[in-house]
């Protein structure tokens, strides 16, 4: 899709990835279009799968969910069935906000958000270790988040958007 990402599409994507609450009229005004053509472009980008969904980002600290941990997880026996079973459970756990299969000595990298150390301990014991699939977990507690963004670096695929947006 990046081959056909013209200047207007790139600017639209940059605007809505930083503020999905903008109205079509506001977006259109900022990119120099009227509302109808702007809406059609947004719809085309949605239909093409470039825009997957629009969400609201909550302040986890203010909600009492300020305890964040990165965990590397190694399965006891990383067979296809065990990998599938682990992933089927992980996608249902709200505490796991990210999960990726990784290379190296671990099988997965998890990003977990919960209330506190005790809730994290309960989560590990009751939801991860109780599966009987895990041989090792290494946890790193986040002290301070330096950068946390959901924005794709559009400047890497389009000359029409600053690499530092």
Image: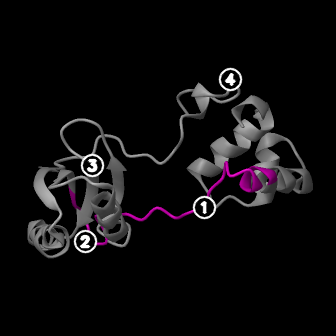
Helix, strand or loop at mark 4: loop
Pointer 4 or 2: first along the chain: 2
Label 4 – label 1 distance at C-alpha: 24 Å
Label 3 – label 1 distance at C-alpha: 25 Å
Q: Is residue 127 left or right of residue 154?
A: left
Which of the 4 image quarters holds residue 55?
bottom right
Up-down: is 114 above or below 37?
below
Q: Could you say where residue 86 lies in the image, as x and y percent from the top left?
A: 29, 64
Quickly name the residue at label 2.
64
Helix, strand or loop at mark 1: loop
Which of these two is toward me, 68 or 128? 128
Specify start and end residues of the magenta stretch as a single range. Answer: 44-68
Label 4 – label 2 distance at C-alpha: 40 Å
Pointer 4 or 1: first along the chain: 1
Label 2 – label 1 distance at C-alpha: 24 Å
Quickly name the residue at label 1.
54
Label 3 – label 2 distance at C-alpha: 23 Å
Quickly name the residue at label 4.
159
Pointer 2 or 1: first along the chain: 1
Pointer 3 or 2: first along the chain: 2
Q: Could you say where residue 13 lies in the image, as x and y percent from the top left?
A: 67, 44
Residue depicted at x 33% and y 56%: 80
Quadrant position of the C terminus in the picture: top right
Up-down: is 135 above or below 85?
above
Q: Is residue 93 left or right of residue 77?
A: right
Q: Is residue 71 magenta?
A: no
Quickly name the residue at label 3.
109
Q: Could you say where residue 70 lies in the image, as x and y percent from the top left?
A: 22, 51
CA neighbours of label 4 inside 10 A, class few (<14), some (14 to 19), many (20+): few
Q: Is residue 64 magenta?
A: yes
């Amino acid at each position: 899709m990046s081959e056909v990402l013209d200047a207007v599409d790139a600017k639209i994507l940059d605007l809505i990835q930083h503020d999905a609450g903008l109205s079509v009229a506001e977006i259109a005004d900022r990119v120099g279009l009227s509302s109808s053509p702007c809406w059609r472009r947004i719809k085309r980008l949605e239909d093409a799968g470039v825009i997957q969904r629009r969400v609201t980002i909550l302040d986890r600290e203010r909600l009492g969910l300020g305890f964040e941990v990165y965990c590397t997880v190694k399965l006891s026996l990383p067979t296809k069935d065990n990998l599938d079973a682990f992933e089927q459970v992980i996608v249902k756990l709200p505490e796991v906000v990210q999960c990726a299969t990784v290379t190296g000595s671990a099988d997965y990298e998890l990003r977990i958000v919960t209330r506190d150390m005790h809730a994290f301990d309960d989560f590990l014991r009751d939801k991860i270790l109780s599966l009987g699939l895990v041989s090792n977990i290494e946890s790193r507690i986040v002290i301070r988040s330096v950068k946390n963004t959901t924005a794709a670096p559009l400047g890497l695929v389009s000359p029409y958007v600053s690499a530092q947006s």
